[in-house]
Amino acid sequence: MKLLIITQKINRKDSTLGFFCRWIEEISKKFEKTSVICLEKGEHQLSSDIKIFSLGKEEGKSRLKYIINFYKYIWQERKNYDAMFVHMNQEYILLAGWLWKLLNKKIFMWRNHYAGSFLTRIAGLFCKEVFYTSKFSYTARFKNAVIMPVGIDEDSLMANTEIERISKSILFLGRLDPSKKPEVLLKALGVVLNGGLNFSVSFVGGPSNPDSKYPEELADLAKTLNIQNRVAFVGPVPNTETFRFYRSHEIFVNCSKSGMFDKTILKACASGCLVLATSKDFESLVGPEFSFLDNDYNELANKLIKLLSMDLSEKEKLTIKLQSIIKNHSLPILVEKLAEHIK
């Protein structure tokens, strides 16, 4: 069977979507032929057997040119794919679902987000199946929805590289956008500081919009809380380098609303971090001791105080517990299941 994958970006170093190169690499092993259409192409190490077509964003083309290129590629390659796997972007299905149906091609969409609209529902109607990981995702309600493992690439954690874990260190890794709620962690750390505990925290990531003033607001909040000397705003880091942060910090915190099941949560578990998250999916997987209520910085502070006060042996037991629980969300398991459903 021949597969066409459609995604936003091919760039192994991209801080947000760099992981998808490994997904493509592993998925391609399950199909006779694999092609990819992306909006923007950057650095990658994908096999030359995988044909990649860029819509041209890296060259600064117009939105109209993207659409023209998109229709050109899906038509000229129509004999080279039997099915489409559209990653996250419903727009491509809205543009071409009718054509793929006429060509008798099977459409599969990966969409995992708490937000959606009638356009999401229309895109879903064109699909044979819609894949998701969070039971709080907008698409989880669809009749053709299929739950999937998160797909953690444990190889990317560079387990053979010696990295020292910093005592009482906390990591926030993700976009510095209001939707990710990093201010909740800052407010919790203000409470932790009042309790007299020592800690350091790294915020790794940048805003979606380069012109955003939100990171400055976070820095101002850190000053107001008098924790600025304990906080490092690292900025965006290439996906290929994030393992250094996962493996050098003791505690990982994710404040995102349930509905996305952010893969950074499970990647942090796999790398040996203790994890605290608001995700209800994560709570149902590992238990309430590793979760806190959405926006409740006081509860987060109390759980941080508990983890920061633990001795090394207690931390190691919890780490092993988390690593054993998330094994069923590895990339190989995800790829097997995707291939089974698409074929």
Image: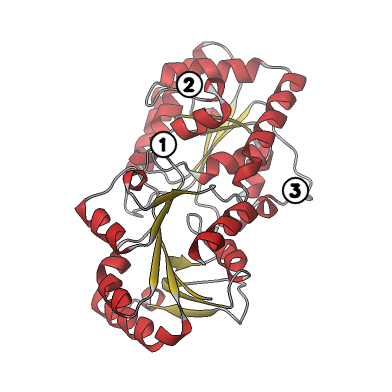
Query: Residue at (51%, 55%) from the top-left corner?
Result: 15
Whole-number angstrom distance, CA of label 3 to CA of label 1? 27 Å
Q: Residues within 10 Å of mark 1 (few under 14, many from 20)?
A: many
Residue lying at 77% horizontally and 50% vertically, measured from the top left: 161
Mark 1 or 2 closer to N-term?
A: 1
User: Residue 57: x and y, percent?
Assistant: 37, 74
User: Counting residues from the N terminus, which is met first, the one under dot 3 or under dot 1?
Assistant: 3
Which x, y percent locates residue 280? Answer: 44, 30
Q: CA distance from mark 1 to mark 2?
A: 13 Å
Identify the amino acid type marked 3: Ala
- Compare residues 142 and 275 and report the one nearer the observer: 142
Query: Which of the two residues, 28 or 210, is positioned nearer the viewer here?
Result: 28
| Left or right: 156 in relation to 14 | right
Do we see residue 150 in this rendering?
Answer: yes
Rendered location of residue 122, percent (x, y)? 24, 59
Rendered view: 39 above or below 19:
below
- Secondary structure category for the residue under label 1: loop
Three-letter code, disc 1:
Ser
Point out the tag, 2 or 3, that comes first from the N-terminus.
Answer: 3
For this orientation, the residue located farthest to the left is: 118
Secondary structure state at the residue bearing disc 2: helix
- Residue marked by disc 1: 256
Mark drawn on residue 159: 3
Instruction: Identify whether 317 is placed above or below 95.
Output: above
- Say which residue label 2 marks: 300
At horizontal 41% and vertical 74% (from top left) the residue drawn is: 58
